[in-house]
Amino acid sequence: MCHGRDAWHCRFTRRRLYKLTKYFSGQSGGEVRSGPLAVAEEGRGKVAAFQENLPLITAICNPGLRERHWQVRVCVCLCVCVMLHMGTSQLSTATHHPQLHCAQLPH
């Protein structure tokens, strides 16, 4: 998931938002504050949704990626987009489409 400094930021942000949610909900002995509670809960949801993308972001930011890697990824993305647009019933047609054939790309 997260590594190094990013892992620390992930844990810190999740923990801080958890504490804020608990505080604003009145669970820690304070009064319930609905406005700030809604903001803290929304923030927790957004952080959780963003964290799902961290493995992809980490992979894309890998300094070891070369041009050939990007060529293959672009072709795969194009194939997937076309397949989604055409629907799964035409999946085999899309994978054999001459303009989307990725065999010519260097591996």
Image: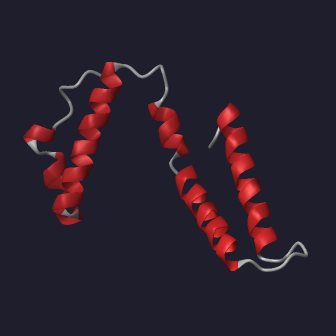
**Residue 103, percent across and down?**
20, 30
Q: Answer with the quarter of the image where residue 96 lies.
A: top left
Quadrant location, the C terminus: top left
Q: Is residue 62 above or below residue 39?
A: above
Where residue 27 appears, as percent x and y from the top left, is 85, 76
Quarter holding the N terminus is top right
Q: Residue furthest right?
A: 29
Tell which residue pokes out farthest to the left in this image: 98
Q: Percent from the top left, x then y, of residue 2?
A: 64, 40
Q: Is residue 70 above or below residue 18?
A: above
Q: Is residue 27 visible?
A: yes
Q: What is the quadrant of residue 21 in the picture?
A: bottom right
- Confirm whether residue 3 shows in the render: no
Q: Residue at x 76, y 63 (%)?
A: 20
Residue 67 sits in quarter: top left
Q: Nearer the viewer, residue 35 or 92?
A: 35
Nearer to me, 90 or 10: 10
- Compared across the picture, whether 70 is left or right of 26 comes to left
Q: Is residue 28 left or right of residue 18?
A: right
Between 26 and 82, the one nearer to me in the picture = 26
Residue at 74% over, 77% down: 33
| Snapshot colouring | secondary structure
